[in-house]
Image (cartoon, coloured by chain):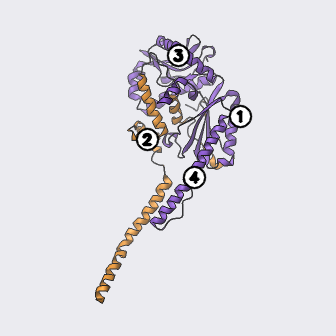
Chain colours: A purple, B orange
Amino acid sequence: MDETIVHAYGIISADDAPNQFPPGIADTTVSIFGVDRLAAVVSLLPVEGFGAADWERNATNVVWLERVARQHHAVLQHVAATTAVVPLRLPSLYGNLKSLADTLRSAAEPLERDLRRIEGKVEWSVKVYRSAEAQSPAVSAPSSSGRDYLLARSRDLSARSSAQEQLRARVREIHETLGQICAEYLRNQPQDAVLSGRREQMLLNGAYLVGKADQARFLELVQEIADDSSTKGLSVEVSGPWPAYNFTGEAETAREALT
Amino acid sequence: MGSDGTGPQRMPAARGAPEQLQTHPRSDSLADVLERVLDKGIVIAGDIQIRLLDIELLTIKLRLLVASVDKAREMGINWWESDEFITRLDDTDEKGELSELSRRLEALEGRINDSPQVESNPTAGEKEARGRA
């Protein structure tokens, strides 16, 4: 291979490194690079195609980005199945292994704190959508004049906004209920319908850090919520387990909160 | 990707109510993966090959896109629009609203077509009035 660059996927504890990995970005071989008590999951990418210039150029190319993001994620997903892993955000490139080692040493303390935070836990995602029938409340009888139409329209709108408020309150309640059996939980911005691929409006985009032993209980609870009659008008979707993307990088989160 | 059994399982959570069953075409959607891989996770700076500022910008763009395609578009961020998957899904919202509007439009058009007859009445009335004078 020609000149290469180091891509780091995530950080694990050196003690519990898995020994097999799926192929990495651009089908490169993934391996472990240990530094003191930590280890980075890495692969060497060709500079040509994955250097800084390529990133700058392709940062606006969602097809390229999707492929790289999915390969990065696939490696993390595999590692997370057996080991606590702190995911690194894309792009995560280092000139050589020595510079990665220096970086790891300087960030060792927060990384170890993150590893302790997620040890023995996994991330689950619960999304709540307004279901299709709640989306469009009964349309008023066809109106014969413009004035009738406007009146009917305003009645529809106020009925819609109070229904919306009830749904929101129910969603807050769902999030808090699920949070009761989690180590940590948070709400992300709802995803836009265009990207989520769903017509329905997303009301909750929740992330839940669940102890491995509590997963079955967590899923039962999600099921109960979905079956509950008060969840009428909502549809609930659960996905996971994910690597703990949402529960690592305290310093990062704190900084972002300021902006 | 995602079909190898190692990816997150996505499942509808409604069992008792079949009309609520939601199946998703992908085991992990593009939005889910982008949201996590490009917005979450940590950045450890060192001899990182890409300036942190660039990562920041990418993150902000992504966050805008994931949360609101319209908002992103308003700010001139439209780089995803070349993606078939996304453009295909776009422009289909508010369907109920649109059909109500087109119903109103049809009704109005119907009235405009009727209007020559409506206007001919005063004319006839005028003639009558003149005839009486």
Chain for numbered disc 4 = A
Residue matched to label 4: A162
Mark 3 vs mark 4: give the one in front: 4
User: Which mark is first along the chain, 4 or 3?
Assistant: 3
Q: Position of residue A223 (x, y in %)?
A: 68, 41
Mark 3 vs mark 1: give the one in front: 3
Give me the C-alpha separation between circle 4 and circle 2.
Answer: 25 Å
Looking at the rendered structure, the kind of residue marked 1 is: Arg
Report helix, strand or loop for mark 2.
helix
Report helix, strand or loop for mark 1.
helix
The 10 Å Cα crowd at callout 3, few under 14, some 14 to 19, many 20 or more, is: some
Mark 2 vs mark 1: give the one in front: 2
Give me the C-alpha separation between circle 3 and circle 1.
Answer: 35 Å
Badge 2 vs badge 1, beta-carbon distance below 8 Å: no
Chain for numbered disc 2 = B
Q: Position of residue A88 (x, y in %)?
A: 52, 23
Please determine whether, in this image, residue B107 is positioned above or below residue A12.
below
Looking at the rendered structure, the kind of residue marked 3 is: Ala
